[in-house]
Amino acid sequence: MTAVAAGPQAPAPDPGTVRGRVALTHRLAERGVDRVLLLAVPGVLALVALFCYPFLYGLQLSFQPAHGGVLGAYRAFFADPFARKSIWQTFALAIPASLINVGASVPISYRMRREFRGKRLLLAVLVVPITLGTVLTAEGIGEFYGPAGWFNRTLHLLGLSSSPVKLTMNYTGVLLSLVISGFPFAYLLIHSYLSGIHPSMEKAAATLGADWWQRFRYVTLPLLAPGLMTTFCLTFVMTFAVFPSALMVGDPDGSTHVISIEAYEAALQRFDYAQGCADAMIMTALMLAVIVAVTALRSRLYTGTTGGKG
Amino acid sequence: MTTGSLPGTAPPVRRPRSQLRELELRGVSRAYGAHLALKPFDLTVRGGEFVALLGPSGCGKTTALNCLAGLLPLTGGEIRLDGRRVDTLPPEKRGFGMVFQNYALFPHLTVRANVAFGLKMRRLGKAEIRDRVDAVLRLVRLTEHAAKHPGQLSGGQQQRVAIARAIVVQPPLVLMDEPLSNLDAALRLEMRSEIRRIHQEFGLTTIYVTHDQEEALSLADRLVVLRDGAVSQVGTPAELYEHPVSPYVAAFMGYRNLLGLTATSGDTAAGRGLSVAGTPGGGPVAAGQPVTVAIRPEDLHVAGDGEPGGAGVGGAVVGEAVAEVVEYHGRTLHVEAVTAEGDRLHLRTSRPVHPGDALRVAAAPERALIFPGDGGAP
């Protein structure tokens, strides 16, 4: 402060401090730190209370099993072939279900960009399942596709099958429920990604001689790919945590013994909280691994603007 | 309303080659429900020609272009390319090049890949694609930007990529939809001559949509002035500039003074404190008929005291007005003057004029066009 030579007209308050203060708020603002940041406070608090704390609590709990030392619960999980198999069974459900949801959304939302008669009705039919709970969906699947359900009765009436087709209480039942409840979500996301691509892109490609498949393959798909990957991650996370339908329309002691059921049984049937927490942590690590892999792949794609003026 | 072939004399052939001999539009129309966006439209474009569709927004010029490109289906009429019918083909089968107003460059592809796109769709060999892309990039002076993405380029550069992408496939016809409207004034001038240069160097046939009469006059061999989906006039820039057929076209061609008067004879009109000796512009005029007199600001000048008509030979005094706005434009002043009746006159003068000065305004009779009917100005 003393370094500032006090000129004849220098103002009385220490000019050095004033300049320093201004510079600090400016520097903070440059890094995005200003009063608007306070808007994030409620959200951050909720996140800490509802996510960070339970997560960390569970994490430390998983390191305190009754026996076997710090990593005992983790070792127990991987030592049990039945528990180990639940990892594979979860992936076997989550990956196909997510791929089907994303894959089916693309052509449908591609078509839905154009106006046609009955578009609103179709949209409603596609999106309504998102409002139904997973339990309701699972119950409905059980009723409809069950051995005595309408589906099998119709097949029987049409003479297409002599004995009921087994679609519930197995892998197929769970996959069906994951597709029915996950599709609307994937569709809505992809639809919005697709409408963000300027229509002039495809028009330009058409005037350059690209037929509909080439327009999709070389213009729309590359611009849509990052959105597809994000959608895949989100539906994957939803389906990886499958629980009610795996119990209700699946085969929870066999082919749909997914990792969340393994954790549930450890914590709430055997009352081994440490084991339950360890199972949940393993589940989290697996999900993260997939998301990191997909995100890494995504970052290698073009992710800038999708049309309009550059 | 005149359509098709007015005394549109063929421009002198000075181009290297043109793949197209003749593009023929017969009764091409487009309706949106009950609204006819483009009324039956006839036009014949010769190979190598540069035709501008000119009109204000909503006049149907972009509709016409999209119909030509195949992006909009026709409601009626047909389009023939050297006798072959093309209006039933989808856009990808027509092989026309199109430059979009927003350029519509593929943001995920490099400049090189953008330009190569059309060649790739035509399944040409890698070596040929590379050579042709290199040649076109040199032509539009973008060789050093070939590896960049469109987002890294300036507006003018993006515009040149869009042109390069459209012409690299050597299309028989290039369609341009207001390609300069997103550029600033200086760049627009530069790109304008660039477009004309490319048109000539590649022997293209170009249809160019614009609302800017200066752009259209300077670029095109022939102009088509559209109004409310119908053709007002077709002709060379000189024909339209010198002999507009209606006050509407006259207004587009820079006749800023449009005065609603009454004819006093076949070639004179008076009213609202003014009297004009002029030339009939769009057909015979009878005394007593309401007329519109169109005069360019350049042709309206301040009459000297005592002199009959200032600089203009044979100039005749039109009336008196008070200068209101005087703009300095170097050698000349642009003056906006108001008559006693409240009509605004736009004129040029090299004499010192100040706001508030009373002026006697004159115009040469051959420069004042008299059109039958009042109104008709845009």
Image (cartoon, coloured by chain):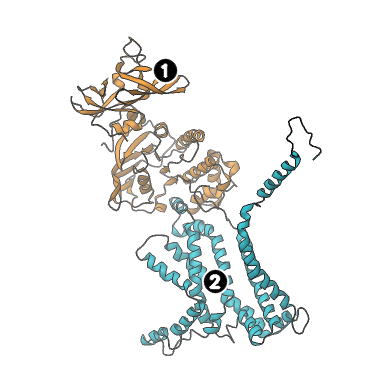
Chain colours: A cyan, B orange
Circle 1: is it few (<14), some (14-19), or many (20+) Cα within 10 Å? some
Q: In what element is the residue under mark 1?
A: loop
Q: How far apart are marks 2 and 1 (CA)?
A: 78 Å
Q: Dot 2 surroundings within 10 Å: few (below 14), some, or many (20 or more)? A: many
User: Which chain does the numbered disc 1 sit on?
Assistant: B
Dividing the picture into quarters, in which one does residue B230 lie?
top left
Q: Position of residue A193 (x, y in %)?
A: 50, 60
Q: Mark 2 points at which residue?
A: A98
Amino acid on which the number 2 mark rests in the picture? Ser
Viewer-nearest residue: B329 or B284:
B329
Pointer 2 indicates a residue of which chain? A
Q: Is residue B122 among the parts visible in the rendering?
A: no
Residue placed furthest toward the left: B287
Which residue is farthest top? B306
* Mark closer to the observer (2, 1): 1
Q: Residue B188 carries which label?
A: none
The secondary structure type at the circle numbered 2 is helix
Percent position of residue B368, x then y: 30, 23
Relative to A265, is A7 on the left or the right? right
Q: Is residue B232 left or right of residue B188?
A: left
Q: Name the residue under label 1.
A: B353
Q: Where is residue B295? Give x, y as percent.
A: 32, 25
Quadrant location of the N terminus of chain A?
top right
Q: Is label 2 on the same chain as label 1? A: no
Residue located 33% across and 31% down the image: B251
* Outermost residue toward the bottom in this view: A163
